[in-house]
Amino acid sequence: MLSDAVINIKGIGEKFAEDLSEMGIHTIEDLIFHFPYRYDVFEIKPLSELIHEDKVTIEGRVLNAPSLSFYGKKKSRLMFNVEVENVVVRAVMFNRAFAKKQIQMGDTVTMTGKWDAHRLQITVSNYKKGSAENQSNIQPIYSVKGDVTNYKLKKSIQAAIKDFGEQITELLPSNYLTSYKLPNRKNAIKTMHFPKDRQALKHARRRFTYEEFLLFQLKVQLLRKLNREASKGNTQHYDKKQVEDFISDFPFKLTGAQESSLSQILQDMKSSYRMNRLLQGDVGSGKTAVAAIALYAAITANKQGALMVPTEILAEQHFQSLTELFGDRANIVLLTGSVKGKKRKEILSSIHNHDVHIVVGTHALIQDDVFFDDLGLVIVDEQHRFGVEQRRTLRDKGLHPDVLFMTATPIPRTLAITAFGDMDVSVIDEMPAGRKEIETYWTKANTFDRILQFIEKRVEAGEQAYVICPLIEESDKLDIQDAVDLYHQLQDYYQSTVQVGLMHGRLSSEEKDQVMQQFAGNQVQVLVSTTVVEVGVNVPNATIMVIYDAERFGLSQLHQLRGRVGRGDKQSYCILIADPKGEVGKERMRIMTETNNGFELAEQDLKLRGPGDFFGKKQSGVPDFKVADMIHDYRALETARQDAQEIISNNLLEEDPSYLPLRLYIESDGVYSQKLD
């Protein structure tokens, strides 16, 4: 059985089984699916095409018995001449004394190594007796640990496929194999380990790329379907005319992207299942306006709405902007941890009685003693992945609202359909007309004095600045400017002419709020901070964002930080202080100065950093694919997603026998028993 332990394979003893176990290989199936992470391709080219100091492969006839000499401690040099295309080439091998007995005069050998065009010499790293025609010129290279070598691993995989290969079952229905011209599973596995040629390897990789994406998307779509079935019963019959009138009273016209996102959200609210949608939009793209319209639609359907945000100060800002937008159309209240005593009791009572239409607050507003009369829509802004616990809290109160998440972190579509596959995704990728672009500059640390003078001039003109750096306190490990040190430096520099504030992650919530209130009220003109200001407060007066050691941040994070300025009508600036050593760091700085489009940056970031780093390994929700690569194999990902949607929506797993192997595979992963709430 493929599920048997690897020790059942001929040639694997207890010690080797233990070593394999360290690599996460426990069963025969694990071993067979431990694919090479790269392949060395040995291609024989004519001598005239070989480039000096390149790694090359040549084939020739041995002209003399190899001569062996020793030097140093146990070091050896083996030399012999080979005839290649009627030219004599010298072959040199280091520390391969044993080869003297293997290589005879007259033998044909295929050798790979570093080419010296001046001396007509190859320093051999790899050789095989015989002509390359009789050998595969593609060598698989596996990731190995400890005492496990490529050779031993390859031998074991060969034995496993020979003895257990017949048990490898096909997962994909035959119509997929035919329409996508994919090899069957058993042959594709053999090719992955022992490729005959590049073409066969390409098709085998294509097969497993598609298979991995399809299995993942099936699980995601299945969870989504199960959750939809569990979430029926929240149709909101909103008043279309009232909603249109509300929009026409706005002091600005909605962009095309806002309109299309809004229509998707309103469609969800009308439908019989609960909305689970992600609304993405760059900083300043107008997500709040769309959220306000959705909340108003819920009110016209005689429902209540809630807007949840990560911090109290953000809650206050949203409360003020919604109050201005709604006027006397709705009763809006603010509910945070600071609201206590009699006032809190009055607010809770009016929420319960449905005297309140919209509640704005931190996540505490859905817990403990807060009871809604009929909650129709919850909007969750930034930093909250509205999880199982929060849903359960609402369900226990008999509430099944539509849920809309909003994020200003542009997530490339590639990742959105993978990591948020259980959600619908709407995108606002258009900025309101007339918004000034933030000017971005990249400079070195030795210009810091000039930057401080520039800040001083802007402060004199009534503007404010952020100065961001990566660490809170000095670290021995990293030579990075830290916030506390920088704060003291700026205080010394400006003396009493400019008020400098300090903000970092070790402050309590109250202290952070206090600092931000002072900054928002212009009692503090320059705020030195770590990245805690990344998501947060709207200070239209802040026009300068200085980012110290900018090479330490990813593109998306730099863009988020830049989005803290440029919120008023004045020209804003972002200054990146960085001295990146590597090409990736330099490329990041170049990209930042060239584009203000968050989605473009996110795509670039994904290419530079990879999906795991993009989200942060732990909470990424992005699976670790063995063969597939979400960035390069994007079209296969799209195809697999569409196929998975079709399979799930047509109940093919349950009703079509040719899909049974797929169903059994997914059942073994326990997806059928999972539900998100």
Image (cartoon, grey):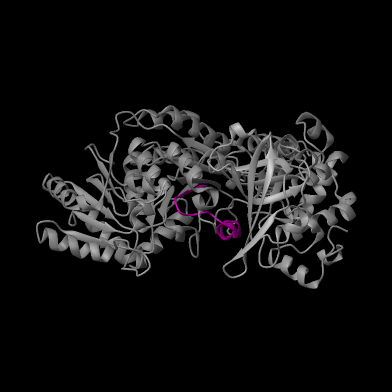
- Give 463 or 96, whichever is nearer the viewer: 96
Instruction: Say if the magenta span includes residue 174.
Output: no
Direction from residue 36 to residue 280 in the image, left or right: left
Counting from the top left corner in percent of width and height, residue 154 is at 76, 55
- Give 444 or 619, whichever is nearer the viewer: 444
User: Is residue 151 visible to the viewer in this orientation of the structure?
Assistant: yes
Counting from the top left corner in percent of width and height, residue 439 is at 27, 38
Q: Which residue is rendered at x = 53% and y = 41% of the image?
A: 118
Q: Name which quarter of the figure residue 389 lies in.
A: bottom right
- Give 356 or 598, whichever is nearer the viewer: 598
Q: Which residue is rendered at x = 37% and y = 42% of the image?
A: 283
Q: Quadrant of the N terminus?
A: bottom right
User: Is residue 222 visible to the viewer in this orientation of the structure?
Assistant: no
Residue 166 higher or lower than 496, as above or below: above
Q: Name which quarter of the figure residue 528 lies in.
A: bottom left
Q: Quadrant of the C terminus?
A: bottom right
Instruction: Say if the magenta span includes residue 387.
Output: yes
Q: Which residues are magenta?
A: 376-396
Counting from the top left corner in percent of width and height, residue 559 is at 37, 44
Direction from residue 439 to residue 534 in the image, left or right: right
